[in-house]
Image (cartoon, grey):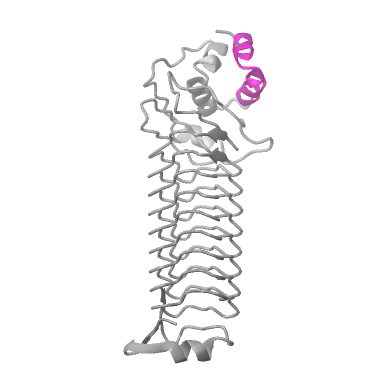
Amino acid sequence: MTGGAARRTNPGFGAQLRAALARDTPAFDAATAAVAGGTASAARGAPAPTGTGARVRTGAGAGAARGGAGVRVRTGTGARLGGVFGRAEAGGWLRELRERVGEGRDLPVAYGDPAVVGADLAGVALDRARLFGARLTGTDLSRATLVGADLSDGVFIGSDLTGADLSDADLRGADLTRTSLAGAVMTGAHLVKADLHGADLRGAVLTGADLSAADLTGADLTGARLADCDLSGADLTGARLAEAVLFRARLVDTVLHHAGLVDARLIGTDLTGAYLTGTDLEKVHWTPATRWPSDLLDRIQARSVQIMPGVFQIAAA
């Protein structure tokens, strides 16, 4: 197949392909060939990978050619693609590669800021991948590993990230509206100004995460672990935080109107300036190190009983 044939079957793809090939990067050649069904290899006169199970590997040398460490994409969906997500360069990466690997009906792959809808990427390994601005709406990323990945300003509306590992991931400004993150590990993740309204975060581990100024309205954080988490200025209106662990968390100026914190652990939590109108604080555990809004402190103390030395519990209203 020639480059012209590729352009006729996928208008606009040829120009993007030529731009990628112009970088003269072996890793990009290999990955593009796999995704485009061999068009890149054919264009260079090289044999194309064949078969649903075709697998392309890229080594450390290929990663270095792109200025960053290589990250293998593993999908576990039958077809496998090894690609490299390195440092973004002037002009960005190839924005969309929607061709499938073999039959690949569940594996659209893209570089840079992909636009993927409804893909099955369960279990994918993208540690330290640079996918800022990715648009992965309705995508299955359950059990995926995205440790240290750059997903800033990404769009994940309605996606499934159940049980995913997003430790130290950069999700600043990301749109995670109605996303399932139940049981996800997000230790040390950066979620400043992220949109998580209506998200399912039940049992999620957010220890040390930065959620300052994030939108968590209507989110379900039941049983979530939020120790040492920064929620300053975040909006948790109507959020569910029953049995959530908020040891030493910062909720300075946080909006908690009509939120449910039944049986939550606020041990050493800083709620200075927090807005708690209509908030359900029944059975909340707190200690003298917990900092309440000054206008509520007397009422909190009056409603509380000591359940063990230095630990108090708020009684039902």
Seen as rendered, the residue at the extreme front is 317
Q: Which residues are magenta?
A: 4-22
* Total numbered badges shown on the rendered structure: 0
Tell me: 64 left or right of 124.
Answer: right
Residue appearing at x 40%, y 28% in the figure: 80
Residue appearing at x 57%, y 83% in the figure: 293
Residue 174 placed where, x, y %? 58, 50
Relative depth, front residue between 261 and 80: 261
Residue appearing at x 44%, y 39% in the figure: 140
Seen as rendered, the residue at the extreme left is 308
Q: Quadrant of the C terminus?
A: bottom left
Residue appearing at x 60%, y 9% in the figure: 5
Tell me: 145 left or right of 113.
Answer: left
Reply yes or no: does residue 39 show up in magenta.
no
Relative depth, front residue between 11 and 277: 277
Q: Quadrant of the N terminus?
A: top right
Residue 68 placed where, x, y %? 53, 41
**Residue 195's image quarter?**
bottom right
Relative depth, front residue between 16 and 239: 239
Residue 17 placed where, x, y %? 61, 22
Residue 185 placed where, x, y %? 40, 55
Tell me: 275 left or right of 168.
Answer: right
Q: Main secondary structure of the magenta part?
A: helix
